[in-house]
Amino acid sequence: MSSGLKVVFWKEMADYLGSRKFIILFIVILVTAVSLVYILSQSITANPTALSPDYMFLNLFTVSAGSLPSFIFFISFFGPLIGIIFGFDAINSERSKGTISTVLSQPIYRDALINGKFLAGLATIAIILISIILIILGLELGILGIVPNTEEISRMLMFFVASVIYIGFWLSLGILFSIVFRQTTTSALVAVMVWIFLAFFILMIASVIADQIVPLDQNSTLEMVAKNENIKNMIMRISPVVLFQEIIVALLNPSARAFGITSLIQATDLLPTPLPLSQSLMVIWPQFVGLIALMLICFAASYIIFMRQEIRAT
């Protein structure tokens, strides 16, 4: 790591960890984790069979508690907002303050600046995620006495890595829009619109396209239904939200072997045998690679555009 990159990285880390948005996010995460653990502990105490005895620690992250959604829903839904919050003003705020030309006049190259901001954002996201996982683990050990086994710990580590990559995509997307758009409000709004499209509207678009290619009616065969579902899934997998959801399903549910219509067939199995972590990773390997590729492509676009932009002293 070059000296310029180190300077930018630690400076951005200090800014992130000392900013109001980090404190607010940490408080929200802390309250959510404590509330989730408390409600789950109450429901489990009242009904000891509420969780499956196999992989009980993993069940804590997938089971919803009353009006509170599950932890994986929290990460899937709010994770993009965390990434966007850390990235939407990474560059254009420096432009509006007139500090970017001052920074680059020092012995700090452009690549060190954008790389340092991206790596500092990833490190901050990793700190937030590992904090909430350790909080939940500590509270569950103290309240319920649930001790995770080696397989569960390994799966949680992979879940942590997948979550960092997932939120890292939205961080890189926020940085991209902060480079393209001069106004921070514009970059934030466009990033949120992209998130809404990829999280909600992609399903409707995929369904419409699949129905146009393979129309279904009451006389449709199982082969036509499967083809329609495969087209829909293929279109939906351009969304990092869908890729991440499939990854966490396989990681936190060891019995998961497939997705889409094949998962419905699998659900008819009365005694599904849990897969070891290595086989679960084989199931989600394409999704994992796709998520990493999306993050790297988005950051590469940010890098190229930023390196070619003209920066004038103000």
Image: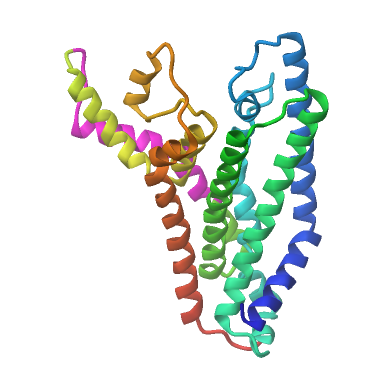
Res 51 quadrant in image:
top right
User: Could you tell me residue 103's position as x and y percent?
Assistant: 68, 83
Residue 206 lies in the magenta-colored region: yes
In this picture, residue 61 sits left or right of residue 21: left
User: Could you tell me residue 164's position as x and y percent?
Assistant: 58, 51
Q: Range of the magenta residues?
A: 192-218
Does residue 190 appear in this view? no
Q: Is 225 located above or below residue 218 in the figure? A: below
At horizontal 52% and vertical 58% (from top left) the residue drawn is 173
Image quarter hosting the C terminus: bottom right
Q: Is 144 located above or below residue 49 in the figure? A: below
Does residue 244 appear in this view? yes
Residue 6 lies in the magenta-colored region: no
User: Could you tell me residue 216's position as x and y percent?
Assistant: 21, 22
Image quarter hosting the N terminus: bottom right
Res 210 quadrant in image:
top left
